Image (tube, rainbow, N blue to C red):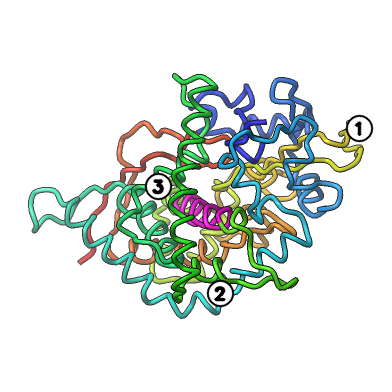
Amino acid sequence: MSSANPQGLQAFPEELASRESWLEPFDWYREMRDENPVRYDAKRKSWDVFRYEDVKRILDDDETFSVNPRLADDFVEPDNPGEGLIFDTMLLQDPPRHDDLRSVVDDQFQPRTLREREPHFRELASDLLDDALGDGREGGDDSESGEMEIVDDLAYPFPVTVIAELLGVPAEERDRFKQWSDTLVSAASDDEGDAEYAERQQQAQMEMAQYFIEMISDRRENPRDDLLSRIATAELSDGSQLSQEEALGMCILLLVAGNITTTNLIANAVRSFADAEGNLFDRLRDDERALTSALEETLRYRSPVQAMTRIATEDVTMRGETIEEGDRIVVWLGSANRDERQFEDADEFRPDRSPNQHLGFGHGTHYCLGAPLARLEAKIALTELLERVENVKMSDADLQPTRSSFIYGVESLPIRYDERT
């Protein structure tokens, strides 16, 4: 197992190895749901599970399906301690330790807490759009038409600035945060070997570790009103503090998950809205309930996280296949969310779909801690955008998928628009 990729998703399945197939993996998902809903991939040494019912069952059973990668038969403890930092996050801990770690920051991500910060978040998004729309005008300041790049101008800088502020680290360093985050979730590029890929990942982890070690040390001496101080000084249920490894792991998790997922949710929403029939942007403007529903449908239709990994703690039979203790299982959320057995017309984007019990943020104990923040950020970003622009259309561009084996989005998303007057 590559320690640089703690989810165990060392590589794409062969069927999704090309960029084109990862941009639209949904036909393959459908084929697997119908013909091979539980299958073993010998090349990746992983089981793949595709149907909604089975994915939800696995996510709901912590005792049988652990998140701890160390339980995998082929797990190799990293030689360099810095490479293993991510293993100490709550993301890869089972209950009860998971619950203890999550309790350190859980209340800061509750909707009632976030509502107090909403006006400030709106200011951040508004400032970004001021810059983007000003720069995007064609033909001078009086022009009403323009072009902007959704990822670079809004979807990336907005959530990374928010999570940086919540943590208590300088927002002006967000480019470093993005580079680290992108590296940690990326798959190998087309032109690099395993050794180069591992070295790139290790370097990013070590740089992040050194950065946060200094920050945590400072907060233990001089605590402030921020998440870093809470992590550095928190007392757990047994009276202990987080170990340095756990504190580092939590900082890294919050930084990476706090911007990567929301970036792709915002971009995937704009892409889905632009592809929808009729002028969906205009229908969603000034209708908070409709926008909320459309974002939930985005989470189902183009889930920012397409896959998660579990380790079997005992032999399990599923769909006639025997998964043995210590085997790695990849549950495909992106496939489960397109399962016709659960969702009517599953391959259609229905902005008003109800009910919509998608698994876009996972399920069970490890349901995404940051889900309320991601929903709020996406709602703010889209609301602010829709108040300012109309006649939004995708620019002619070849979309390139995010090069990750579990994060789903596009590297850039240029749009054309008319400014509202």
Q: Amino acid at mark 3?
A: Lys
- Residue 140 shows in the view: yes
* Residue that badge 2 annotates: 111
Which secondary structure, mark 2? helix
In what quadrant of the picture does the N terminus appear?
Answer: top right
Q: Which residues are magenta?
A: 248-264
Residue 73 is situated, as x and y percent measured from the top left of the image, at: 80, 32
Query: How many other residues sit within 10 Å of disc 2, few (<14), some (14-19) or many (≥20)?
Result: some
134 horizontally vs 343: left or right: left
Q: Which numbered disc covers residue 320? A: 1
Q: Is residue 395 above or below residue 254?
A: above
Q: Is residue 383 above or below residue 180?
A: below
126 horizontally vs 244: left or right: left
* Nearer to me, 348 or 75: 75
User: In whole angstroms, how far apart are the C-alphas of marks 1 and 2?
Assistant: 42 Å
Q: Is residue 268 above or below residue 327?
A: below
